Image (cartoon, grey):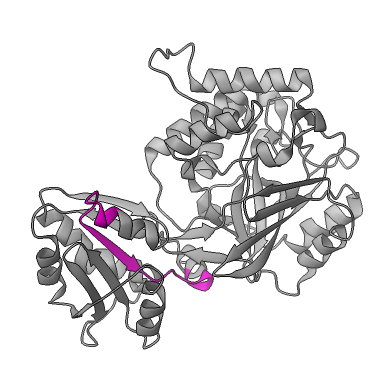
Amino acid sequence: MSQAVPVIAPLRALRYREQAGSLSSLLAPPFDVISTEEQAWLYQQHEHNIVRLEYAMSYPGDTPQGNCYTRAAATLRQWREEGVLAQDERPALYPYRHSFTFQGERRQRLGCFCLVRLSEFSQGVVLPHEDTHSEAKADRRQLLRACQAQISPIFSLFREGRQEASAILGKALGEEPIARAELGQERHELWQIADPTLIRRFAAVLGAGPFFIADGHHRYETALAFRDEMRQAHPEAGELAAYNYALMMLVAMDDPGLVILPATRMLKLGARPLALLQEAAAEYFQVQAVALVPGAIAPRLEARSASGQPAFAIVTAQGSLLLTLKPTVELPRDPRGRLEVSVLHALLLDGVLAASRERQLSYAMGELEPCRMVESGRYDAAVFLNAPGAEQVLEVACAGQRMPHKSTYFYPKPATGLVISPISAQERAGLPETGRA
């Protein structure tokens, strides 16, 4: 039996047109990082902001016949009728340059929006690295059913090898972009490759695979379930039906703009949080009371972990701790078990949460906001850790394992609203003149 390989196809993207308004006021982050406050703010930004499709408002009087999903679908139909959104005439790949500032340095990440044929994870073509929750998948599935469009991309990585894929995309960057937007300090630029020869070359270069999902596990698993529904309802649509494909943004794993951040663990522990953490840590960790301030935590952790021993920082209102795993503690040999986030949960957090009456765990990004949430009393402790490297992520994925939930945060998120992939039963993927993807 031959090894399954990725199938890459161009798409006739649904995109904003000039009459929609300034693109800078129309884009949004993916749904999973939009807070309730930001959702309301994006609604006020512009009447055509993509949030009205990606994460439409819910209201107290909603019913099965009238809700956030039906409103998103109605809005999508209206925008297409009015020409706010229009579909490109030719199938194309869409190179995407995302410029941003990280730790005071200006960076660029190069990706490409395209279609990738959906396949089960067991086939080894597209590999996950992180656990998912059923609630988010149910939400995205209802949105897919209502809109029959993939509104935000799945962010995936590939091993590049000889830089051939980046060279193909780089040729397009010499032209004027077809879309440009500024969101704060971030710049989003989009190009289009409609030349069938270049499209086939790009697909051939990446044809060995596999692809690794960086962000969008819920969306991929939802797309698989929706594909199965559509195949049953529309068997006549055939293999080139667009619902057989996922909208992806592909990025080389050695791209200099690829940034992985850790997700800080926020704990609600009730009485004596610092004492509880100290007592639990004493068996496995060297514990040092230190003064930790936002901006200085990551450098301290990186310096500690350089010795090869996992290290963590804990900030509470009563004081801060620096934990370093004792050299006598033997780590698991499997890729998942060796991860710092796995060590943290297995040797400290799972036991602490089980012993606490509160037992609340949440997540936050950066250093300033988690420390503020502890200072305000909203949480009792913030636990900081190092981010895994891209190679660690791929090692876990290739081993058929998954990291604990919220182990990685690929920064920054690609913008939602640059490219939409329609996936109705009538929509086709690939180059029409070849009859194949």
Image-quadrant location for residue 109? bottom right
Let me know if residue 40 is in the magenta part: no
Q: Is residue 210 visible?
A: no
Q: Quadrant of the N terminus?
A: bottom right
Horizontal side, residue 198 vs residue 125: left or right: right
The magenta stretch is 373-392
Residue 73 at x, y percent in the picture = 60, 21
Q: Nearer the viewer, residue 133 or 26?
A: 26
Q: Nearer the viewer, residue 337 or 399?
A: 337
Q: Quadrant of the C terminus?
A: top right
Horizontal side, residue 271 vs residue 383: left or right: left
Image-quadrant location for residue 64? top left
Q: Is residue 287 visible?
A: yes
- Residue occupying image coordinates x 55% and y 66%: 259
Image-quadrant location for residue 287? bottom left
Horizontal side, residue 436 vs residue 342: left or right: right
